Amino acid sequence: MHTRNPFAVSALAAMLLVAGAVPTPAAAARKAVPGAPSAAISGDRGEARDDAGRLVYIEQDFVWDGGTRRLTLYRCPDGLPFARREDDARGGDPAAPDFALDDAQTGYREGVRRNADGMRRVYVRTNRASHEKSRPLPAARHLVIDAGFDAFVRAHFDALLSGVTVPVEFLVPSRLRAIGFRITRIEDTAAAARGEVAFRLELGRWFGFLLPHIDVRYDLRTRALRRYAGLSNLRDARGDNIRVTIDFPPAQSRSDIPRAELAAARDADLDGRCPLR
């Protein structure tokens, strides 16, 4: 399903498309896992489906360094990888990590990087033919970046459970700015029957009802993300964010991933080609 959205919430999806901790910016070190920690590497596997239930893509997640680093490899239904995202929250706010997304199918790139002087910038390149645009990272209260949303939800889990509406300023790299959203608990009988709780992310302004919201389900006991439903951070050939539902079943969670498997995911050629629609 195509969804043209004037706010292009490309990163608004990425924030959640993984269950677990937080994140490694893609850049230099791709050929190995430099300084690989002795702690175990964990991860999950999710299947993204469209409204008709068709498998659109698969995402494979790796989390390490105490949850501060994350790599996500996106694969076509045939298993070939086509995009990769890395997040790194070391030494900073777990809710606002540096990150880099590279979609080799379209040439779309976005992220937050640190300059040599330590200043952070948000950047975006819409396709291979376009030039990269960037801007200093905006100063915002309760700033949330990419997969840091998961850390933010965990930090406010009890408040959300009690029915409190929590405001966030979510970074949208495609617009080089942060936009105000709110997170609220919603009633979801199907989630409750599975021992899960549902939250909704929507624009915190009067016109929010005009734009797509994002619904997520978390396991009440483990507080792990189990379902995401909304716009993906990936785009189709027209440049539109696609709408998907992604399930992260507990049976697909792993806590003992070999370092070699993480290194292979970092080094994988992004040569997969699959229509995202």
Image: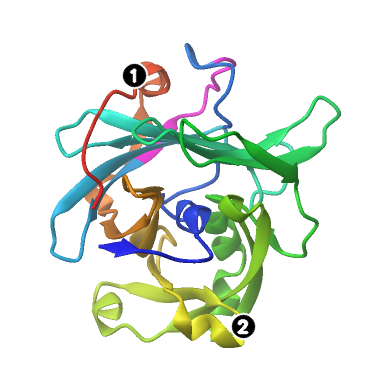
Mark 1, residue position: 269
Q: Is residue 141 above or below residue 253?
A: below
Front-most of 49 and 185?
A: 49
- The N terminus, quarter of image: bottom left
Relative placement, left or right, of 223 versus 140 is left
Q: Residue at x 25, y 47 (%)?
A: 276
Q: Which mark is residue 20?
A: none
At mark 2, the secondary structure is loop
Relative placement, left or right, of 219 versus 88 is left
Q: Quadrant of residue 51?
A: bottom left
Q: Residue at x 38, y 55 (%)?
A: 240
Q: Do we see residue 134 in this rendering?
A: yes
At mark 1, the secondary structure is loop
The residue segment tinted magenta is: 34-43
Q: CA distance from mark 1 to mark 2?
A: 42 Å
Mark 2, residue position: 205
Amino acid identity at mark 1: Asp
Place of residue 188 in the rendered image (x, y in percent of width and height, measured from the top left): 32, 82
Q: Is residue 216 above or below residue 102?
A: below
